[in-house]
């Protein structure tokens, strides 16, 4: 690999792509004092966030360099050779670059040493991407501790989607025809998800998710974690996808595998679940308890990074569960290091359940219940009863029900609750 030629060719390939870049509702503010670490699922648009920044800032070729560590030949280079990238850039353009964009860094062994060395020179604003949450844990906790700022990039939000589709939306001012068009797009969004390839390039969802799941499973899980029992890993990823927006039982799946003659331990299955989370395929939510230990040991619920994944694994459409998953992903988007909160679910010994408990350092901030209801009459008593119990148990005054199409207030069973349609909640500018 001739790295100098690669740096030239990369920009030549990039120029026609920049014209097609859609802006995201994610701001990058890189500087020399902190490394910007863009993390998230494969194919969610992390690289295009680079491109969007280059386009918006109108960066000249001499101002930046970009390396994708998954490009052919790059992983074969030595750390010393990669460190020469800024020297090659100066040789080509007559100046040191202001910005260094490193894509999918986890594909290069020793990336953290390279990034840290360049960072210590205090000459560049460094932005990197990765498809592993370990960028926030193992590697960053050792080499880059205190020197990085994470930016989570997920597939397009619903707000981004309607902008791409050309729907004009002004919060609080929506006519009936626009509202109907938005709800139609919401059904499509829940079914097909928000991955850019599906939204922008009209790739058939079935084709996209087949490739996406295969690459994620084998490259980000089996290969990265050196898994030998591939069939068990395949079984587990299907089991997780089938359980979205529900409690997930490792023991149940362990017994099922065991009954089919698979020799695998529960500890290994727990590891698989964590690997899927590291790769941003799925997320695990703990049951809320004032005892941190009890919460950690409780049953977990699982959610997918994109609702379209569920359609790939099953043709059955449970709109209520898809809505709940969409709410969870939006909560992840609204969370950030600047306004950090924790997400739990709540369930008592009688089975009463609240979908989301939002907690920050000062206590429980809000309770959210999600239901596929289009009228006040369709909101079941159990939804309200669970909220009433949770408000009392968790000492929380703020509760909301996210519906399909009902908006208003319910004052019943000793509880007053605001109800908001999902599409309005997803498009609102409010912060959690």
Image (cartoon, rainbow, N blue to C red):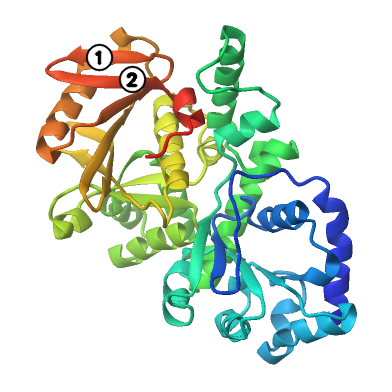
Q: Is residue 263 visible?
A: no
The percent position of residue 120, horizontal first and vertical second, equals 58, 85
Q: Is residue 289 left or right of residue 185?
A: left
The percent position of residue 315, horizontal first and vertical second, equals 53, 30
The percent position of residue 295, horizontal first and vertical second, equals 19, 54
**For the residue carrying disc 1, how many other residues have a C-alpha within 10 Å: few (<14), some (14-19), or many (20+)?**
some
- Residue at the image point whose x is 87% and y is 85% from the top: 91
Tell me the quadrant of the picture where the C terminus can be found. Answer: top left
Check the image and report above or below for 225 versus 335: below
Q: Is residue 353 left or right of residue 250?
A: left
Q: CA distance from mark 1 to mark 2?
A: 7 Å
N-terminal label among 1 and 2: 1
**For the residue carrying disc 2, how many other residues have a C-alpha within 10 Å: few (<14), some (14-19), or many (20+)?**
many
Q: Which residue is mark 1?
A: 410
- In the image shown, does 324 or 300 lie closer to the viewer? 324
Check the image and report above or below for 414 versus 234: above
Check the image and report above or below for 27 versus 415: below
Q: Is residue 44 visible?
A: yes
- In the image shown, does 273 or 31 lie closer to the viewer? 31
Tell me the quadrant of the picture where the N terminus can be found. Answer: bottom right
Question: Quarter of the image holding residue 81?
Answer: bottom right
Badge 1 marks a residue whose secondary structure is strand
- Residue at the image point whose x is 13% and y is 16% from the top: 413
The percent position of residue 330, horizontal first and vertical second, equals 46, 40
- In the image shown, does 33 or 277 lie closer to the viewer? 33
Q: In the rendering, which numbered label is found on residue 419?
A: 2
Label 1 with label 2: CB-CB less than 8 Å: yes
Q: Is residue 242 left or right of residue 153?
A: left
């Amino acid at each position: 690999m001739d790295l100098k030629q690669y740096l030239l060719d990369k920009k030549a390939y990039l120029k026609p792509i920049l014209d097609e870049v859609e802006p995201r509702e994610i701001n990058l503010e890189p500087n020399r004092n902190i490394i910007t670490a863009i993390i998230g699922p494969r194919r969610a648009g992390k690289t295009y966030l680079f491109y969007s920044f280059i386009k918006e800032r109108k960066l000249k070729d001499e101002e930046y360099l970009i390396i994708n560590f998954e490009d052919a030949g790059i992983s074969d280079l030595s750390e010393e050779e990669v460190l020469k990238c800024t020297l090659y850039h100066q040789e080509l353009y007559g100046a040191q670059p202001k910005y260094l964009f490193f894509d999918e860094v986890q594909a290069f062994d020793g990336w953290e040493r390279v990034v840290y060395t360049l960072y210590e020179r205090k000459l560049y604003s460094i932005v990197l991407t990765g498809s592993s949450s370990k960028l926030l844990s193992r590697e960053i906790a050792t080499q880059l501790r205190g020197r990085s700022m994470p930016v989570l990039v997920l597939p397009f939000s619903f707000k981004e989607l309607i902008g791409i589709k050309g729907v004009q939306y002004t919060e609080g001012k929506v006519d009936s025809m626009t509202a109907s068009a938005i709800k139609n797009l919401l059904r499509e969004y829940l079914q097909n998800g928000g991955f850019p390839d599906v939204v922008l390039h009209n790739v058939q969802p079935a084709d996209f998710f087949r490739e996406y799941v295969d690459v994620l499973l084998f490259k980000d899980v089996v290969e990265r974690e050196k898994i030998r029992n591939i069939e068990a890993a395949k079984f587990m990823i299907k089991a997780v996808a089938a359980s979205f927006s529900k409690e997930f039982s490792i023991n149940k799946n362990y017994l099922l595998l065991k009954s089919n003659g698979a020799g695998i331990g529960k500890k290994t299955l727990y590891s698989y679940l964590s690997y899927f989370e590291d790769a941003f395929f799925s997320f695990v939510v703990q049951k809320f308890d004032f005892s941190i230990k009890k919460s950690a040991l409780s049953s977990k619920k699982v959610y997918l990074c994109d609702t379209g994944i569920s359609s790939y694994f099953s043709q059955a459409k449970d709109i209520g569960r898809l809505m709940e998953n969409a709410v969870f992903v939006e909560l992840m988007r609204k969370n950030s290091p600047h306004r950090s909160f924790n997400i739990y679910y709540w369930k008592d010994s009688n089975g009463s359940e609240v979908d989301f408990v939002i907690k920050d350092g000062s206590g429980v901030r809000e309770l959210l219940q999600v239901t596929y209801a289009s009228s006040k009459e369709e909101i079941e008593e159990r939804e309200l009863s669970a909220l009433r119990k949770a408000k009392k148990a968790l000492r929380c005054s703020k509760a909301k029900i996210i519906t399909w199409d009902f908006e208003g207030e319910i004052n019943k069973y000793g509880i007053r609750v605001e109800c908001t349609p999902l599409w309005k909640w997803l498009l609102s500018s409010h912060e959690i």
